[in-house]
Image (cartoon, rainbow, N blue to C red):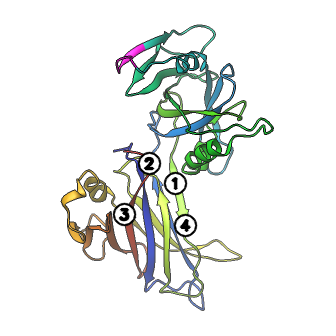
Amino acid sequence: MSDLPGFLSVRVLRGVNLVSRDAGGSDPYVVLHLDNQKTTNPVWNEELTLAVRNPETPIQLEVFDKDTFSKDDQMGDAEFDIEALMQIVRMDLKDIRSGTVVRTVRPGRQCCLADESHIVWENGQIVQDMLLKLRNVETGVVHLQLKWVNIPDLRVRSDSPSLPQSAADSASAVAASRPPEEQHLFHSSNPSTSKSIILDLRARMRSSSTSSLQKVKTSVKKKSVNPIWHEELTLSIMNPIAPIKLGVFDKDTFSRDDPMGDAEIDLEPFMEVLNMDPENIRNGSIIKTIRPSNQNCLADESHLCWRNGKFVQDIILRLRNVESGELQVQLQWVKIPGRH
């Protein structure tokens, strides 16, 4: 489930009968937290596009532990050569059977390989899996997969040292979908290019722990205990078992924001239906109904529907740790184009 090709869209619709924290009402906003737990064996399964101009330049890799109130801690680094891969790219492999190992690169003192790395012709693509041993740290291994991606009709302007526009669009589109802390994991020494490599990350870390906490929030609604937001917040789901934690706060200018209640959203029912084939489901059909209980924060039944080509779940949450207040949200799954 961790490699689902998409993101969860949480639309915060409105609050009902929220508590008043100020003399003239409240200035509420909503914060969503998704904590995928601390892990020393994270699995990313994410693609990052790098522009390659000089195949002799190794790619530098760094791993960090994300900290909220201090500088991110280093968790090791490595580098890997792409010369062997680039040599295979220049070959005509159309007549080779899929799954054929074209070349094997072995570990040595001059590289960071933890094991043999095989370059394979697979389903019409050149693919190289590699295990990298992290340096400058007690322990840790990162699993990468390289794929060569040809960019059709690419033109390189000889008078421009920058990345060609189509390649830049490809690279920025991938980077834009990543949290800021993940965008700096890879650095290319020379960004000018007419080609790209796609890195499919699978990491096995055995050194120190790293946390994956996402935090997004709505705008502030002035002087209202029945605010209407209709704002869409997007979260990347790595662990479908981890609930979304939701907090409502009263915005204060000269003091700490006052809490106005909290709740949790259980994602498991929603994530389970994503494996269904919606082809024969009629638009508007209710696929599953989740009822309120002592184990959830639902104020009313929540219906999971197939609506206009999307799985949608409408939820009314009863806020905890506060005198009164409900929050209406809507979940939708957003697919990433071109991913299956």
**Pointer 3 residue:** 265
State the CA–CA distance, disc 1 to disc 2. Answer: 8 Å
Instruction: Name the residue: 59% across, 86% down.
Output: 22
Q: CA distance from mark 2 to mark 4?
A: 18 Å
Label drawn at residue 36: 2
Q: In the rendered structure, which amino acid carries the disc numbered 3?
A: Ile
Element on which disc 2 rests: loop
* C-alpha span from label 2 to label 3: 14 Å
How many dots with numbers?
4
**Which is the main secondary structure of the residues drawn in magenta?**
loop
Q: Are marks 1 and 2 in contact (CB under 8 Å)?
A: yes
Instruction: Determine contact: label 3, label 4, CB under 8 Å.
Output: no
> In 3D space, how far apart are the residues under numbered discs 3 and 4 (Cα atoms)?
15 Å
Question: Dot 1, how many residues are within 10 Å of its Cα: few (below 14), some (14-19), or many (20+)?
Answer: some
Q: Which residue is tagged 4?
A: 217
Q: Is residue 67 visible?
A: no
Magenta residues? 95-101
- Which residue is denoted by mark 1 in the rendering? 214
Tag 1: residue type? Answer: Gln
